[in-house]
Image (cartoon, coloured by chain):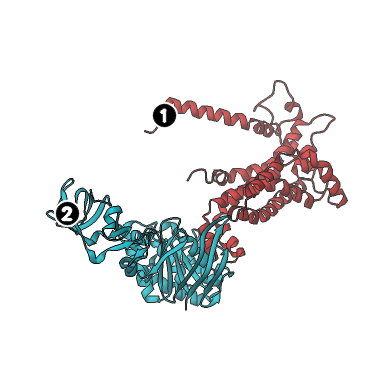
Chain colours: A cyan, B red
Amino acid sequence: MGQIQLQQVTKSFGNVEVIPPLDLTIEDGEFTVFVGPSGCGKSTLLRLIAGLEDVTSGHIAIDGTDATTLPPAKRGLAMVFQSYALYPHMSVRKNIAFPMRMAKVSQAEQDKRIDAAAKALNLTDYLDRRPGQLSGGQRQRVAIGRAIVREPEAFLFDEPLSNLDAALRVGMRMEISELHEKLKTTMIYVTHDQVEAMTMADKIVVLQAGVIEQVGSPLELYRSPQNKFVAGFIGSPKMNFVEGAEAAKYGAHSVGFRPEHISVSTTEGTWQGTVGVAEHLGSDTYLHIHGVPGCDPMTVRASGEFTVRHGDTVFLTPDMNHIHKFDADGLRVS
Amino acid sequence: MARSVTQQRKIINTAAAWAVGLLIFFPILWTILTSFKTEAQAISDPPVFLAFDWTLENYSVVMERSNYMRFLWNSVIIAGGSTLLGILIAIPAAWSMAFVPSKRTKDILLWMLSTKMLPAVGVLYPIYLIFIKMGLLDTRIALVIVLMLINLPIIVWMLYTYFKEIPGEILEAARMDGASLRDEVLYVLTPMAIPGIASTILLNVILAWNEAFWTLNLTAAKAAPLTAFIASYSSPEGLFYAKLSAASTMAIAPILILGWFSQKQLVSGLTFGAVK
């Protein structure tokens, strides 16, 4: 069991309140991602749950029992850090064994769990090496191994893939997702990368300035963002916002269209503009169009075969089934 | 572009470095040479450099006259004891300053260092009186405490600098892994800081070994270390240079040998963190 409940949790550093009162429930077995721009308080929130920071007020319950004042080790949580935080003076085997050694697990049981974790994470050949002799991806796997052997109530990941190169990141993303499928343990994952959030999460918590902007499944957030911040943050490339008089035509303060919900034509359409930068990805082409009223530049997704050049005139037509309307406060208008 | 160094320049630089090195080492070399001369040769004018009758007589006289081994043993106890005690106190102190600093941590560090600026003689009288009252005068335990206290600021500073280099996340990981504070310091922090701790120990052993002010003033016969052994050969009724040199050589030999074998450790420790 690994249900985590935050009730009216706040955190201040000196006079600065980084987390205003916040309520959140993470269900047992759920893969929850905290996502938001840097400085939004997502890492602080994770550290509060871990017990590495003390809450200023409010309560944290793990599995229904109050854990607010428990030290980190007593919360039954395992954490994987961005910098891996491996013990450089210990071999991989000793690194993985460390939490079990602290918990006074019998040697036979330790060996059994180390072998199982090493097999699952492809680390069997590296058990006697030091962390310094491993690549970034291998180090992160050791950090995950060290977390697994504790058989925790929940895993906490603090931007675990930020130090890896792009190709490795995609691979590790899969591995962590598969691990979740296999273990079915609660996982909380902090990232600033909305692609990681979208691809891995059961539930995404979007944070800004310590405030939860929206909680929902990836597709809920994508299809019906509750405000402009979430609309702009989730989805890549970003949603286009049309402001001013042009938005008023649609009866809103501002309206948003995702790049994939705008069709491009060389002959006719709602808006006319000129091509600025065209990014050819092969499968798709992203066009940055200048001159659209109320939105400059507007990003649209065209098919990979669609060939236009810088300076060409194109016509754009938004898909009215996928219009997002917002009021003057940035809140969604249905 | 790498700086190009001509062969000629290299030779000049090397020669200059050797000259400076020899100049600094010369007094020690002279002491060692003098210890093998007779008293007459030791004060002859002009001085003789190498062409004298090498003799071990001074050493045998010194060994006969004083109990060298007792002084040596006192030095070992005092230097080793004060360093060990200092390290035991400084590790937790440096840990808290490096990893859970308060608003005043920087001030406390500076204040600690400022005590090193106090002239020792200024507190000699009160300390002397306290030690008389406590019956600690001329005891090794007194010198262990005093030398530990005067070197503690340096030990804390050095360890603080080394600990600052250790990423806090690793200690947090240990905490998450269930390590108590004791486990964290014992199994994670200390092993990671071993090079730093080793050079701190070495430097402080050397400082304590060479310390003369307190060791001369607070000891008489029982607890006197090698510094007092040297001093006992500088008599007011006429100097015996050769014997004094022999005594000095015997006093500095152990620490010189220790320094020689550990110089790699010392240099790497003292420049730790200066370059990545």
Say which of A322 and B35 sits in front.
A322
SS class, disc 2: strand
Residue ranking furthest to the left = A267
The answer to whether B198 is drawn above or below residue B9 in the figure is below
Q: Amino acid at mark 1?
A: Val
* Crowd band around label 1 with a 10 angstrom C-alpha radius: few (<14), some (14–19), many (20+): few
| Residue at x 56%, y 28% (from the top left corner) | B19
Q: Which residue is mark 2?
A: A315
The answer to whether residue A52 is seen in the rendering is: no
Percent position of residue B140, x then y: 78, 51
Disc marking residue B5: 1
Label 1, label 2: how far apart the Cα atoms are: 67 Å
Q: Would you say A112 lies left or right of B263 here?
A: left
The answer to whether B267 is drawn above or below residue A239 in the figure is above
Percent position of residue A106, x then y: 53, 76
Disc marking residue B177: none
- Chain of residue at mark 2: A
Percent position of residue A188, x then y: 43, 68
| Residue at x 75%, y 31% (from the top left corner) | B241
Which of the 4 quarters of the picture holds residue B21? top right
